[in-house]
Amino acid sequence: MDNHSLPLESPSMSRRKLLNFLTGAAVASTAGAALYPVAKYFILPSEKGEGGAIIAKDVLGNLIPASQILAEPVGTRALVAGLAGEPTYLTIQKDGIDRIGIVDNCTHLGCTFPWNGTDQEFQCPCHGSRYSADGSVLPGPAPLPLKLVNVVVKDNVILISPWTEIDPRTGETPWWV
C-alpha cells in the first residue's frame, strides 16, 4: 500500500441526516405558518405611533378619532387620556387641533383641575393654583408651569408624544425633560 494515497473521508452530512434536516425544516415552517395567525390574535395591537407617540383615548380607554374632537366649537378644550394615562387638554383651533397639549396635573401637589371657560384659565381646586390658557403659572402656590406634550393628527388619529423642545412660554429647556 502506498503511503502517499489520500484517505477517503465520509461526507460531513449523510443523505439520511440531510433528509431528516429537510423534513424537520418543512415541518417547522408549516407549523410556524399555521401558528402565526393564532399568536397574532392573542397579541394586543400596538397603540404607539411614530417616535413613541401614543394614541389619545377617552376615560374608558377607547380610541378617540380626531373628527370627534374637531366637531366641537373652536376654542373648546377636550380632555383626553395622554402619556402614561395622564389627563391632557387639547385645544380646538380654526385649522384643527393645536400642536401643543397641556397635561392636567398641578405642579403644586399633582391635583387634576378643570378649565374655567369664563375666566379663561385652569384653576386647581385643591390649593388655589391658577394657570393661564398656555399653562403658565398665575398667582398661587404652584412653582412651575404645566407640562406640555406634542399633538399630531394623522389619518384621523390623535398622536401624543413627550415635549422635548424649548418651552415656548419660558424660552428655556422644559423642567420635565
Image (cartoon, grey):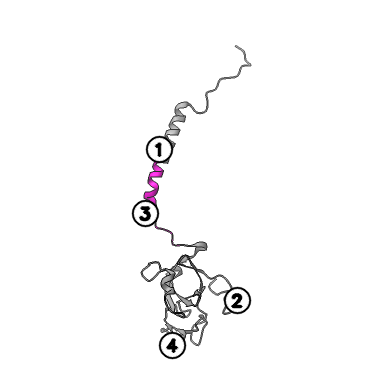
Q: Are marks 1 and 3 in contact (CB under 8 Å)?
A: no
Specify the amino acid type for callout 4: Thr
Specify the amino acid type for callout 3: Phe
**How far is the residue under mark 3 from the one under mark 2?**
45 Å
How many residues crowd mark 2 within 10 Å: few (<14), some (14–19), many (20+)? few
- Please give the range of residues in magenta: 30-47
Q: Quadrant of the N terminus?
A: top right
- For marks 3 and 4, the one nearer the N-term is 3
Specify the amino acid type for callout 1: Val
Residue 92 percent across, percent down from the top left: 47, 77
- For marks 3 and 2, the one nearer the N-term is 3
Circle 4 is placed at which residue position? 118
Q: Secondary structure at mark 3?
A: helix
Specify the amino acid type for callout 2: Glu
- For marks 4 and 2, the one nearer the N-term is 4
Residue 149 percent across, percent down from the top left: 51, 72
Q: Kindly identify which numbered label has been placed on residue 27.
A: 1
How many residues crowd mark 4 within 10 Å: few (<14), some (14–19), many (20+)? few
